[in-house]
Amino acid sequence: MDKLYGLIFDVDGVIADTEAVNARASIKVFADLLGVEGVVHKDFEAGLGRGAEEYVKAGARVHGLELTEEQIKKATQLRQEYFLKILSQKLLPAFPGVLELMDKAMKEKNFRVAIATSSTLEKSRAVLNAAKVLYKKMVYINGDHVKNKKPDPELFLLAAERMGIEPADCVVIEDAPNGVQAAKAAGAKCIAVTNSTNAENLSEADLVCDSLEKINLDVIKMLIQKNI
C-alpha cells in the first residue's frame, strides 16, 4: 500500500485574511462592552490561534484588565456576532495558493486533507464558505470538538486520527506561534506562513514561507521524509 500523507490547514490567517476582521470585531467589543478605547490589532497578538477566550484575555492583559468569567463569556459571544456581521458585509477570498494546494492534494490518492481550527463551528464555517473551501469533502475539526485549545496538540491529534494517518506523516499549515507549537507537540511537521506575524515569531516551524503559492505536494512529501 502506498504511503499516506496528511495535510492539515488552520483557518484564521491561513485560509483567508481573517485576523483583520477578528481584531476589528474585538476592538469594537472592548469599546462597546468594556468601555475601553485605544485598543489596537497588535494588542491581541499573544492570543493568536488560541481560541476566542484567549484572544480576548490577551487584549485585556495589555490594558491591565482582569476580566471575570461572565465578562469573558459575554465578550466572546459579542465578538462572534460582530465578526459574522462584518463578514456578511465584505468579500473574504482565500489567500493565493490555498485552494490550489487543497485541490491538488484532494486529487492525489495518497493524500488526505483536513481543516483544524480553534474557532467555533459557526464562525469557521462562515469563513470557509466565504473563501469557497470544499470543507465537506475533508475532515473538519473545529473548536467545539476539543476541550484544549492551542498550544495543546489535541486539535491536530484529532484531525490526524480522523484522517487515519499518524501525526508524523502529517504537515500542519499554521500562521501563529501557538499553532506551530501545537503542531510540533502533536508530532507533526509544520509549515508556517507569515500572513499574521513575522518569520522570527514562527521559527519553531520546519519551514516558513510568505505564501502558499510556493508550496507544492513534493515539498510536503519531502518535509515528512525529512529531506528538507
Image: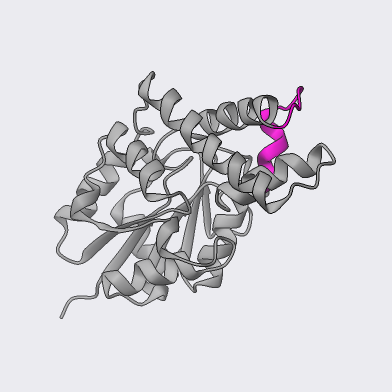
Task: Indicate left or right for 85 with 72 as reference.
Answer: left
Q: Is residue 110 placed above or below 197 in the rendered structure?
A: below
Q: Can I make out residue 211 in this image?
A: yes
Q: Is residue 47 visible?
A: no
Q: Nearer the viewer, residue 92 or 197?
A: 92
Residue 92 rendering spot, x and y as whole percentages:
37, 27
Residue 147 picture location, percent across and down: 50, 67
What are the residue bounds of the magenta stretch? 34-47
User: Which quarter of the figure has residue 1?
Assistant: bottom left
Give above or below for 72 relative to 156.
above
Q: Give percent across and percent down for residue 35.
A: 74, 26
Q: Where is residue 67? Give x, y as percent.
A: 75, 47
**Which residue is rendered at x = 55% and y = 40% of the image?**
194
Q: Residue at x 65, y 49 (%)?
A: 70
Q: Residue at x 25, y 35 (%)?
A: 132
Q: Is residue 44 left or right of residue 185?
A: right
